[in-house]
Image (cartoon, rainbow, N blue to C red):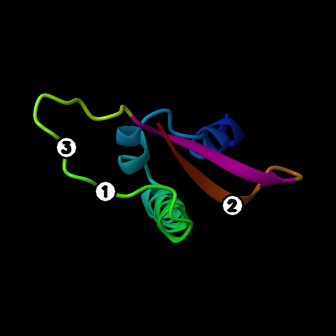
Amino acid sequence: MVAEAFIADFEEPMTFEEGIGCKQIRHWKCAMDVEMSSLIENETWTLEELPKNSKAIPYKWVYNIKRNPPDSIDKYKAKFCC
């Protein structure tokens, strides 16, 4: 039972709100910072003023934990998806 609770604490969040509301917030924030820095560095997108009567493209954060055997955490990853 204790082992199950430990593993459950390290599951990937399904939403941004879960990511910033969990115990591993510093790991997820760092992963999101790395992703945003990569997008900016690679000139993948630019931030623009939204024209009147236009809608922004919907986006989502996708979280993943890269694990090493036997189930130790190697890396927290976050992807910004549109």
Quadrant the N terminus occupies: top right
Q: Please provide the residue range marked out in magenta.
A: 59-68
Q: Position of residue 21 (x, y in %)?
A: 35, 46
Where is 47 relative to 1, above or below?
A: below
The secondary structure type at the circle numbered 3 is loop
Give the farthest residue toward the right: 69
Contact (Cβ within 8 Å) of mark 1 with mark 2: no
Q: For the residue marked with disc 3, what is the amino acid? A: Leu
Residue 63 shown in magenta: yes
The majority secondary structure of the magenta stretch comes to strand
Q: Position of residue 6 (x, y in %)?
A: 63, 45
Q: Kindly identify which residue carries mark 1.
A: 47
Seen at 68% across and 36% down, the residue is: 4
The secondary structure type at the circle numbered 2 is strand
Q: Position of residue 44 (x, y in %)?
A: 51, 57
Closer to the camera: disc 3 or disc 2? 3
Q: Nearer the viewer, residue 21 or 54?
A: 54
Q: Kindly identify which residue carries mark 3.
A: 50
Residue 50 shown in magenta: no
Decide which of tag 1 and tag 2 comes sooner along the chain.
Answer: 1
Contact (Cβ within 8 Å) of mark 3 with mark 2: no
Seen at 74% across and 52% down, the residue is: 66
- Give the distance between the C-alpha atoms of the residues marked 1 and 2, in whole angstroms: 28 Å
Q: Is residue 53 left or right of residue 24?
A: left
Where is 71 relative to 42, above or below?
A: above
Q: Kindly identify which residue carries mark 2.
A: 75
Q: For the residue marked with disc 1, what is the amino acid? A: Leu
- Give the distance between the C-alpha atoms of the residues marked 3 and 2, in whole angstroms: 35 Å
Local crowd size for mark 3, using a 10 Å CA cut-off: few (<14), some (14–19), many (≥20): few
- Give the distance between the C-alpha atoms of the residues marked 3 and 1, in whole angstroms: 9 Å
